Image: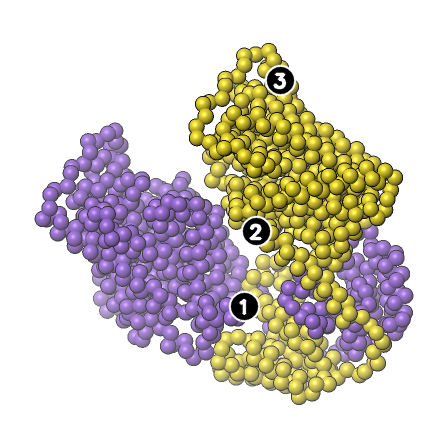
Chain colours: A yellow, B purple
């Protein structure tokens, strides 16, 4: 049943040699990797305006130079990442670049930042997308957590199907959003040039004085537009050959589109005198003024919602890849390396979906609680990655390395400044959580690696073990006597002549009746009756086994547990599962081997 | 760690012979079993008024004769149950009475009704109690589901500690509520007689005509006051000896208290011209008018909230007992019969807490969605139980049986009428769900019993099995070669001379390198390399074992799985758990015994 469900939702298993066929064409790759970056167009302008409005509507014009600076920063970061892709064609995210150039510690810090940020991207984007829906249909507000979890489920399912199909699945919304924003900008400029001038700003109330700090805050808030730019450099291996060239081409497209949309929306917002409003997003205000309340307004809102939800998809493309890379370096559990049936890193997808769902439930799918945690990780990884590239240039000295070094140095400096500004501005609002989490994660990464190292040492075969004759003692725990027990006894007797059955008597009558039956059916095996004042079977058995073990430390004790396999799955709920409990209970005991002899019911 | 947590929350395990000591004194028993019935005082009057107001405030006086009828019904039902307790001193709920007198089918219908109703009682009562808190502190409304789940958790923990201690834990709120309502009624009458007459009702608006059906609906809504009366008859065995007499005494107290409080509140509501209001409960209105907004009003509201949450406790006392009784009759999984460490039916408590939590999450802890499902089960079980007593009187003919038969016949008839009215009035509002669920449950009960019967048949030893010499084939699945594998091989060789290791090669290079190492360290055991285009280890192994099994059906195949036991619990997440997966995968295969040989890490 589980198989049918899985095959319907996720698709049939694919053979391993299909791996290189499942690559993304450039148009699909843009859709998969760009949605995170593009979706920030939906809120970045508003974030700038929200800070500037503190100083009064008059200063909203500052959004123009600020977003100009951000677009400049975008091109600097994109240029830097294009060099990274060229230098690390097998996929070089901040983790790899920082680790190779700045050492393991810096790599792990970048890795922790990115992993945290991917989880936050999923949670924030899905919550924001659902908030867009519930703003349109307020009666759904009550069910936002359920809707958000369903959203995560849909995206996770798409990604479990595999990279190529998820490219198809998500191309529509990504291009729909680009189309919607493009239309909005073109129609907006046209109407502005041909129509009536928009009404002026309201008269100012009481405002903060404009300070340099406020401008820096507005700038750093607008930098939300830059989250997601690094996605492509992490996912180079998902591109068709030649991977590096294709990835670079797509990154260039992405930067161009992002600059046009973000710049256009900011400029239009200024032209149309948009003032941020708690109840309505800037995009929605713009669309309503420019397009009216009709079907084209609805299209813009739907496209915005879709891109926000799909921004989460970028993380689903990248988190599992980064996790598998860190697992290969022994810093994360090995299971994250395994390709699943559909040639995707299924465990990473499950882990991300689980962590994001946890955050969505914990914060009741409310974005404003999550947003302050959000950008710290991105800019920390930007800074580390570009500092890493600076070191790379100094070491490798490729052609034109001085120019490239300058670009990366500029990028590293600016992103470091932005990082500090974000930390200061948002520290008390939640950024402190990230500053605690990152060191904890890094410490855990080291602990994981240490475990693998120590485990490997213990498992190493340094010399051939001299063969020795094992002496077996076989113990069969029983509650009553029936065919299942008889088969277990038969098996036990075939292992050793030293077999004993053990029962834990909860009351004297049951013990007596079992002993009588035992004499009749299994008189060749001694039955040991243990007494206990409690109702647990496990503890007295463990105690007994310890005693037997102490008597002859040379012996190897095999516990043969009779168990049932029912004919129907739901019958499992009708039995005690004591064989499973016993198996788990003896797990910690050395010198004890656990064997299940199963009795299969026919019906 | 789990043990420390458990001992702190639930207490240390108790020896079995403490069972008879853990009985309830009558005052504790009243608190434990009465809270469900008493809590209905908090809303029963309001339910009557809510129906009557449809015909206009003028007709609210009809609440007096209606509640008179309900109090009469209460005494009839209580009298009937006192006979049940006398006839079934070992605890005779509707399930037992219906089963013994009307046959198994009727017993199971009563059992299904009761189990459903216990779960609903927990969900409805906890949600209503939390709603009382969130009405007082509106900022908590957002967190009502979490609060409700915490409430369920507290009550479940209290019950897991054991019957006697939960009696202590819950006596305060129950008696607090009786005190609060008693005070309210006494002060209310005193103020009415000495103070100004209350303001008259508002002028009527547009109303429905008063019909007989409306009066019946009002009556049946008020019958919510009677839910929980049957609790004592289910829990007779929890009383101190002599159980039946003590139980009857407590039932008499309960009926008297309930009649006084319910009658008093209804009468006061009429005196003070209380009109039901969506925003404020009738009790809250009464308390505010009579006691003002001060500390005594707060006490009434707090006591009401506490009793509502503790009403859930009645179900926690009864659900596990009924479930264990049905499990003893093989209609429910056996595990529900087991007494836990603290001499309570822990599994039943967990099951109830889980089911109620599920409903609370599913319905967002909103009572109005659950209430229509609520009373059907109670009155179905009332009717069946009293019809059963009618048959009992006809069969047994105890002294005065004619009088008793008449009482039960009257009770059965009236509860049947009420049941029909509830079904008709609430069918489209959710009662239909219960009419579907009950037959499903009954069918499942039969299926469970059939399974146990069939399983017992298959396990019966009808004759001694002739001893035969088992031929062993031992298969050791391996991925790489290390100390753990060597111990497993050593163990395997001690079982049989026919040992082979099997590996699934995901790629040729790994296979080659393993074969080379194998020749060095384990050349005495043949290594079989299986090839697969997929990345699953399990399927090729299963296929191989099937082939080996087919070659020689006489053989018994033992699969020896090398596995790890890490030194720290969290290390488990760092390994594949493939030994567990393999064990589960081979579970369905006949003729296969699964053995784990564990390698214990030292650090």
Respond whether the residues carrying marks 2 and 3 are from the same subunit: yes
Let me know if residue A485 appears in the view: yes
Picture coordinates of residue B495, whole percent (x, y): 78, 77
Characterize the local packing of mark 1: few (<14), some (14-19) or many (20 or more) Cα atoms within 10 angstroms. Answer: few
Query: Residue at the spot x=43%, y=79% of the render?
Result: B17
Picture quadrant where residue B285 is located? top left
Picture coordinates of residue B233, whole percent (x, y): 33, 64
Characterize the local packing of mark 2: few (<14), some (14-19) or many (20 or more) Cα atoms within 10 angstroms. Answer: few
Picture quadrant where residue B530 is located? bottom right
Picture coordinates of residue A43, whole percent (x, y): 58, 33
- Position above or below: A26 against B95: above
What residue is pinned by disc 2?
A433
- Position above or below: B105 against A29: below
What residue is pinned by disc 1?
B2
What residue is pinned by disc 3?
A189
Of tags 1 and 2, which is closer to the observer?
2
**What chain is tagged by disc 2?**
A
Secondary element under disc 2, as helix, strand or loop, is: helix
Q: Are marks 2 and 3 in contact (CB under 8 Å)?
A: no
Q: Earlier in the sequence, mark 2 or mark 3?
A: 3
Picture quadrant where residue B558 is located? bottom right
Left or right: residue B540 compared with residue A271: right
Characterize the local packing of mark 3: few (<14), some (14-19) or many (20 or more) Cα atoms within 10 angstroms. Answer: some
| Label 1 – label 2 distance at C-alpha | 28 Å
């Amino acid at each position: 049943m589980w198989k049918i469900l899985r095959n319907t939702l996720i698709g049939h298993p694919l053979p391993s040699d299909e791996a290189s066929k499942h690559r993304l064409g450039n148009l699909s790759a843009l859709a998969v990797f760009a949605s995170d970056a593009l979706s920030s167009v939906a809120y970045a302008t508003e974030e700038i305006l929200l800070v500037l409005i503190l100083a009064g509507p008059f200063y909203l014009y500052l959004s123009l130079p600020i977003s100009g600076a951000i677009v400049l920063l975008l091109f600097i970061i994109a240029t830097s990442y294009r060099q990274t892709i060229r230098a690390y064609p097998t996929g070089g995210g901040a983790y790899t670049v920082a680790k190779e150039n700045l050492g393991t510690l810096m790599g792990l810090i970048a890795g922790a930042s990115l992993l945290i940020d991917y989880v936050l991207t999923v949670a924030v984007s899905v919550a924001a997308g659902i908030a867009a829906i519930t703003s349109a249909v307020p009666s759904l507000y009550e069910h936002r957590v359920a809707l958000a979890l369903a959203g995560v489920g849909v995206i996770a399912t798409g990604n479990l199907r595999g990279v190529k199909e998820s490219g198809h699945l998500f191309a529509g919304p990504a291009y729909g959003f680009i189309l919607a924003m493009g239309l909005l900008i073109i129609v907006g400029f046209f109407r502005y040039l041909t129509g009536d001038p928009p009404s002026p700003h309201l008269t100012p109330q009481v405002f903060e004085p404009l300070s340099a700090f406020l401008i820096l805050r507005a700038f750093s808030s607008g930098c939300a537009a830059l989250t997601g730019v690094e996605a492509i450099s992490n996912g180079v291996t998902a591109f068709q050959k030649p991977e590096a060239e294709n990835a670079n081409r797509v990154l260039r497209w992405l930067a161009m589109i992002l600059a046009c949309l973000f710049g256009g929306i900011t400029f239009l917002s200024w032209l149309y005198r948009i003032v941020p409003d708690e109840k309505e997003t800037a995009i929605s205000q713009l669309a309503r003024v420019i397009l009216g309340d009709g079907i084209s307004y609805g299209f813009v809102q739907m496209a915005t919602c879709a891109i926000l939800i799909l921004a989460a998809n970028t993380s689903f493309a990248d988190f599992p890849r980064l996790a598998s890379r860190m697992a290969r370096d022994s810093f994360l559990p090995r299971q994250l390396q395994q390709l699943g049936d559909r040639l995707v890193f299924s465990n990473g997808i499950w882990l991300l979906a689980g962590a994001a769902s946890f955050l969505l439930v914990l914060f009741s799918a409310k974005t404003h609680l999550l947003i302050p945690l959000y950008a710290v990780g991105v800019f920390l990884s930007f800074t580390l990655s570009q500092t890493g590239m600076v070191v790379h240039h100094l070491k490798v000295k490729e052609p034109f390395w001085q120019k490239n070094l300058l670009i990366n140095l500029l990028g590293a400096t600016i992103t470091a400044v932005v990082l500090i500004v974000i930390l200061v501005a948002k520290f008390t609002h939640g950024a402190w959580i990230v500053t605690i989490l990152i060191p904890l994660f890094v410490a855990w990464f080291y602990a994981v690696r240490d475990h693998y190292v120590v485990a490997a040492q213990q498992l190493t075969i340094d010399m051939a073990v001299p063969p020795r004759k094992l002496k077996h003692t076989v113990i069969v725990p029983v509650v009553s006597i029936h065919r299942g027990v008889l088969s277990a006894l038969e098996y036990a007797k075939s292992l050793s002549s030293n077999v004993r059955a053990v029962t834990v008597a909860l009351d004297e009558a049951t013990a007596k009746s079992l002993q009588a039956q035992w004499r009749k059916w299994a008189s060749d095996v001694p039955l040991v009756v243990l007494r206990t004042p409690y109702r647990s079977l496990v503890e007295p058995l463990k105690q007994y086994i310890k005693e037997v073990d102490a008597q002859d430390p040379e012996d190897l004790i095999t516990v043969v547990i009779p168990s049932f396999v029912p004919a129907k799955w739901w019958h499992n709920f009708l039995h005690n599962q004591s064989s499973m409990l016993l198996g788990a209970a003896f797990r910690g005991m050395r010198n004890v081997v656990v064997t299940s002899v199963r009795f299969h019911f026919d019906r």
